[in-house]
Image (spheres, rainbow, N blue to C red):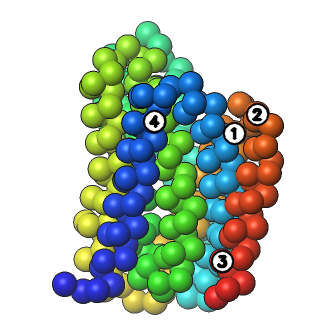
C-alpha cells in the first residue's frame, strides 16, 4: 500500500471520529453540545480561512495560472450546495418527511464526500498542505455532527434513526470520499492538481467565512471572538513553521 495514501485516510477517519463524537455528545448532553458548539465553529473558521489565504491559495496560484477562476468555482459550488440544503430542508417544514429522509443524505453526505476528496487533494500536493488544511477541517466536523443530528430530531426523526442517519451522512461519507478520490488524484499532473487545490481553497473559505462564522454569530457566546482569534493564531503558527 502506498504510504502517501495513509495520510488522507487517517485524516478522514479522524474527521469521521470527531463528527461521531459531536453526534454522541449532543445525544447524551444536548444542552452542553448546543451551548458550546459555537466555540468549535469559531475556532475552526479562524483556522480554515487563515490557512486558505496564507498557504492553500498562494500554493495553488503557483501550480495553476488560472487558479483564481477555480477558486471562485469552488466557492460557488459550496454556496449552491448550501442554498439547496437551506431551501429544501430548513424552509420546507410541510415536507419534513421528504426533506429529512432524502435531502440531508444527498446534501450533507455530498458535502462530506467533498471533504474526503479535499484530504486526498491537499495531501497529494504536500504533507504540510494536507496537515494545515486538515486541522481546521477536522475541527469543523464537531459542530457539523451536532447540527446534522439536531436537524433530524427537529424534523421528527426518532433518536436512534437520527443518530445512524447523521453518522452515515456526516461521518462515514468522509473516509469514503477520500478512499474513492485518492486513486484518481495521485495520477494528476501539476496544473490539474493546482486547479483542484484552488477549488478546495474556495470551498474551505466558504465553509469558514460563510457557514461557520454566521452560525457562531447567531448564537453569540462570551468567548467566541477569543476562539476565533485562537484559530487564526494557530493557523498563522502552522504556516510560519513551514
Q: In which quarter of the image is the N terminus?
A: bottom left
Distance from the alpha carbon under mark 3 to that under mark 4 = 29 Å
Q: Quadrant of the C terminus?
A: bottom right
Q: Mark 2 points at which residue?
A: 220
Label 3 crowd (10 A; few <14 / some 14-19 / many >=20): some
Vertical order, 45 against 128 (above or below): above
Q: Name the residue under label 4.
A: 25
Image position of 104 (left or right of 210): left
* Residue situated in front as seen by the camera: 116 or 232: 232
**Label 3 vs 1, first from the N-terminus:** 1
**Front tag of 3 and 4:** 4
* Quadrant of residue 185 within the rendered picture: bottom left
**Front tag of 3 and 1:** 3
Label 4 crowd (10 A; few <14 / some 14-19 / many >=20): some
Q: Name the residue under label 1.
A: 216
Which residue appears at 61% of the width and 76% of the height?
56
Distance from the alpha carbon under mark 2 to that under mark 1 = 6 Å
Amino acid at each position: 500500500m502506498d504510504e502517501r495514501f495513509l495520510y488522507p485516510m487517517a485524516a478522514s477517519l479522524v474527521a469521521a471520529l470527531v463528527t461521531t463524537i459531536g453526534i454522541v455528545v449532543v445525544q447524551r448532553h444536548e444542552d452542553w453540545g448546543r451551548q458550546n458548539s459555537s466555540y468549535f465553529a469559531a475556532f475552526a473558521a479562524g483556522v480554515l480561512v487563515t490557512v486558505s489565504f496564507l498557504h492553500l491559495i498562494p500554493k495553488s496560484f503557483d501550480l495553476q495560472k488560472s487558479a483564481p477562476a477555480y477558486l471562485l468555482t469552488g466557492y460557488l459550488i459550496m454556496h449552491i450546495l448550501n442554498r439547496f440544503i437551506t431551501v429544501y430542508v430548513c424552509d420546507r417544514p410541510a415536507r419534513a418527511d421528504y426533506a429529512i429522509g432524502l435531502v440531508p443524505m444527498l446534501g450533507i453526505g455530498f458535502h462530506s464526500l467533498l471533504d474526503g476528496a479535499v484530504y486526498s487533494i491537499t495531501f497529494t500536493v504536500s504533507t504540510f498542505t494536507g496537515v494545515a488544511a486538515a486541522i481546521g477541517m477536522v475541527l469543523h466536523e464537531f459542530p457539523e455532527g451536532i447540527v446534522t443530528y439536531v436537524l433530524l430530531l427537529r424534523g421528527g426523526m426518532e433518536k436512534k434513526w437520527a443518530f445512524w442517519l447523521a453518522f452515515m451522512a456526516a461521518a462515514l461519507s468522509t473516509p469514503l470520499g477520500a478512499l474513492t478520490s485518492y486513486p484518481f488524484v495521485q495520477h494528476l499532473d501539476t496544473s490539474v492538481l493546482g486547479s483542484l487545490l484552488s477549488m478546495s481553497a474556495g470551498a474551505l473559505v466558504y465553509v469558514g467565512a460563510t457557514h461557520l462564522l454566521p452560525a457562531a454569530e447567531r448564537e453569540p457566546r462570551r468567548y467566541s471572538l477569543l476562539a476565533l482569534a485562537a484559530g487564526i493564531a494557530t493557523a498563522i503558527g502552522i504556516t510560519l513553521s513551514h
